[in-house]
Amino acid sequence: MASKILIVGAGAAGIAAATRLYEKGYRNFIILEAENRIGGRIHTVPYGENVLDYGAQWVHSKTDNFVYDMAAEHDLVEIEPQRENGLCIKSNGEEVSIKQTHHAMDLLTSSIADVQRLKAYSKSLGDYYVEFFQEALQTGKFGDIDTETCYQIFDFFQKYHNTYNAVDSLYEVSASGLLEFTDHQDEYLINWKTRGFKTILDILMKRLPEQNCNPIPLEDFILFNKNVTKITYPSNPDTPVRVMCSDGSIYVSDHVIITVSLGVLKETHHKLFSPKLPLMKVNAIEGLYIGTIDKMVLEFEKPFWPAGWHGFGILWRREDLVELRKTDLKWVEGICSFFVPEYQPNLLVGWIYGKDARTMEAMHEKEVVQGLMFVLRKFLIKYNVPEPKTFSRTTWYTNKNFRGAYTSRSVMSDILDAKAVDLAMPLVNSLGRPVVLFAGEATHPEYYSTVQGAIGSGWREADRLIELYANKEMKIHFSKL
């Protein structure tokens, strides 16, 4: 099948590229999606009393963020209040005071405020935090918090940042590379009220009644369950790009916009592209980092916790951790915390990261629930924790169409000098015209790991082609309608 533009992936970047092209009058394009749904790592489903976001959940910042701007225009998002009653609980059920927890966490977080020190630091973010922690401990900056609790909170702090950055270990994260990410931190959490993050896709496709305009019929351009296995790109300007799928179908096109995850590129690039990608592109794919975080969702008949309780962070005592590591439940060490989502009063969601998340994904659901109940009953000894009504989980690594959650900058990124701009650079033919273009959150130099980064990258590549065909000579070559 022939089309002028082929988009691989109907996630946020692919939808953004397609809607931008459509709004500019382009119709001769096709989207190939490996899943049976749109959204990619945006995945909102009906669950419990409302909806549940298996993937992207919160809007990150209201500053310089068009996702927030588009949603706020129609009053679709809200800023969650700071949860002053959030808890950290030890593995013997002891609760750490809110005052102590906040003091320790704020002190540790302040370590990255020294931009010049961070920029000059050549080792990992894990090393950076350890040095700061030891210095703060020796100089008494933790105040009246006993040493054992300081170590437990520091362990939780590291787990929190492993989860936040979607990494196996902070010793893999580039300390100076952290500065590449633009994080305004102007608000705590911004949620989608009762609608879920898929609402941003409705906004892009103009499907909200509030938008008062004709919706974009993007379903007319999407082919589902299309797993791309080969992309042959020419240097000859008269030869089209050939895209083959696992079902044997072949598509030819003048341009292909690749929006698949970095995890998929890492696993397939050596066999996906013909000819093989240039070294700069390979370094970017292999050097940039994508990790695993998952959500584990327990639904109860009714809350067993008191009103206003929003969950807790996990602090393992050293002796309990030693015993845990001797058992088949050692994977639960990777659980960072549990939280109660807004508008879902009966749900408790656990966050897990790294190798333990990948272990969890491979386990039977019943085994996972047993592990979760072990943790809840060990830590929440003051409550009578009942059996859950339902259970669900994410499997972002196991799914071959994602192979991870989102991206960050690693020590390997520094070694290979891997940059998002290198990943974003299109492959061109002998005339210098782009034939294979790259979009997705991993290709954004400032907002990688976010939906605004994904959408912005999709717009960027669509605009690249729109600009290419903006002059009259090219318009004759490429019929828009």
Image (cartoon, rainbow, N blue to C red):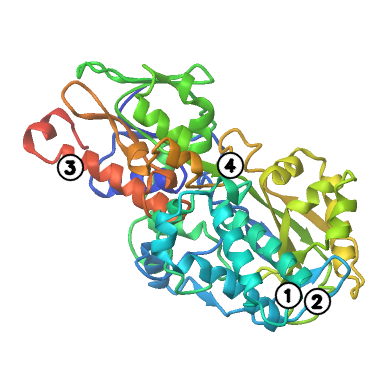
Label 3 close to label 1 by CB (< 8 Å):
no
Percent position of residue 143, x then y: 67, 81
The kind of residue tagged 1 is Leu
Percent position of residue 426, x then y: 29, 33
Structural distance between the alpha carbons of marks 2 and 3:
59 Å
Whether residue 67 can be seen here: no
Residue with the most extreme left position: 472
Structural distance between the alpha carbons of marks 2 and 4:
33 Å
Label whose residue precedes the other's in the sequence (2 or 3): 2
What residue is shown at x 46% (from left), y 69% (from top)? 113
Q: Quadrant of the N terminus?
A: top left
Task: Name which quarter of the figure residue 137 lies in.
Answer: bottom right
| 423, above or below 107, in the image | above
Residue tagged 2:
95
Task: Name which quarter of the figure residue 103 lies in.
Answer: bottom right
The kind of residue tagged 2 is Glu
Residue tagged 3:
467
| 305, above or below 348, in the image | below
Residue tagged 1:
87
Structural distance between the alpha carbons of marks 3 and 1:
52 Å
Label 2 close to label 3 by CB (< 8 Å):
no
Closer to the observer: label 3 or label 1?
A: 1
- Crowding at dot 2, Cα within 10 Å, few <14 / some 14-19 / many 20+, comes out as some
In this view of the protein, which residue sits in the foreground, 463 or 479? 463
Closer to the observer: label 2 or label 4?
A: 2
User: The residue tagged with tag 2: helix, strand or loop?
Assistant: strand
Left or right of 29 in this view: 86: right
The kind of residue tagged 4 is Gly
Closer to the observer: label 2 or label 3?
A: 2
